[in-house]
Image: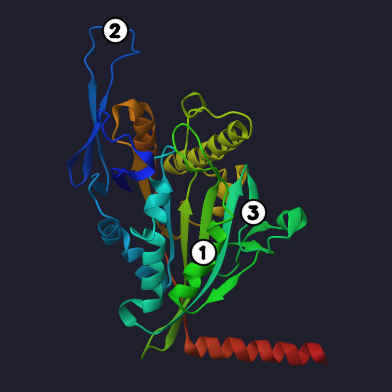
Amino acid sequence: VIARLRPKGVCGGRDTAPCSLQPYDKYTCELKVSARGHNASNQEDETRRYEFDACLPEGTTQEQVYDEVGDVVQSALDGYKVCVFAYGQTGSGKTHTMVGSDDAPGLLPRCARQMFAGGDSKGCVTVRCQIFELYQDNLVDLLAPADGGSESTSKLTVQHEPCTGDVFVKSAETVTCTDADALLDVCKKAFSRRATASTKMNAESSRSHLMLMFFTEHVAHNVNNVTYGKLTLVDLAGSERVKKSGAEGDRLDEARAINQSLSALGDVVSALTKGEKHIPYRNSRLTQLMSDSLGGQAKTLMIVNVSPLGEDSSETKNSLDYASRVKLVTNDASKSIETKTVLALKKEVDELKKKLSSK
């Protein structure tokens, strides 16, 4: 888990307001929680410290953020399932961290370029991608033809690949890319269809969860094997207090759906940390989609994006408490490698099956 304080000027940040959150050291952030509302006028403000794998201050550049998390791409090329997801209140800089802008590219474009560079062992890389938004708990395929209508959306089902355990969406459009520019162009077109709207907390608030699934096939130079990995990037919609965000009408329905799915994600985290036998992945589309990333065989990184401002201290505390619980979840990461000999045998078996079926 990595904590990132919202950079100045991002999401219309009110940069002149007093701050309540400060980095204490490279792993720890310190939050001042107001004593107001505790029915005790003589109480002093409380200071709480939260320790994570890294704490990134406001001045952290996009490149420095990537330096902290860039190993995830190498892990995917090595055959692991990897997930990076951004969590935080609305307007805390999640989309800035995950996607960024032309002037300050975020994790996605940097990951794409590193993927096709082939990692430590170079070689040939092919990426199949699926991109979705989860809008009011409805799964929307952002790569499907725009005129596909509700019928194509209703056919989407979340499934697990039997051999690898990878989560994928059946009947969704899958685009295969062999270079970074093609992949980023596909992503850009998908993002143009994502639901956003203005609230009091953010002029361009994401009103849906965004999920990008990249299935990698890596044939390394001078090595007799092929590795199959998966990199999942998730830009969660912001948790929000309806009264503070001023949500009404459609915005109110969106806020309720967002908070409900984030609550379901919290239930999964709680069950995992308590070691319960039943994990409620099926309670939400969001948790179904993330079921191979939380408590499974994946390497998972959470980036909790937080506002340093005093007026947001209550939401910041909630986000940091949530991240502290996520930090207790343990995964058992494993990788998927097949030698060229095994691949040849599989191909031979498939050909024999075809011959038998044709008789």
Kindly indicate whether the residue at mark 1 contacts the one at mark 2 (C-beta within 8 angstroms).
no
Nearest to viewer (mark 2 / mark 3): 3
Marks 1/3: CA distance? Answer: 14 Å
Q: Earlier in the sequence, mark 2 or mark 3?
A: 2
Q: Which mark is residue 177?
A: none
| Mark 1 nearby-residue class (10 Å; few <14, some 14–19, many ≥20) | many
Q: Residue at x 53, y 57 (%)?
A: 191
Residue 46, how many percent across, how many down?
Answer: 24, 22
| Coordinates of residue 252 in the picture (x, y in percent) | 59, 31
For mark 2, what is the residue?
Answer: 40
Mark in the foreground, 2 or 1: 1
Image quadrant of residue 71?
Answer: bottom left
266 lies above or below 134: above
Picture layout, residue 274 above or below residue 156 = above
- Left or right: 186 in relation to 227: right
Mark 1 or mark 3: whose residue is earlier in sequence: 3
Q: Which residue type does callout 1 highlight?
A: Cys
Residue 254 appears in the figure: yes
> Is residue 356 depicted above or below 119 in this figure?
below
Residue 141: image quadrant is bottom right
Which x, y percent locates residue 164? 54, 68
Specify the amino acid type for callout 2.
Ala
Q: Is residue 229 left or right of residue 207?
A: left
Q: CA distance from mark 2 to mark 1?
A: 52 Å
Identify the image quadrant of the C terminus: bottom right
Marks 1 and 3 in Cβ contact (< 8 Å): no
Left/right placement of residue 298 relative to residue 137 reads left
- Badge 3 is on which residue? 140
Front residue of 200 and 142: 200
Tell me the CA gap for discs 2 and 3: 49 Å
Residue beneath disc 1: 187
Question: Mark 3 falls on what kind of element?
Answer: strand
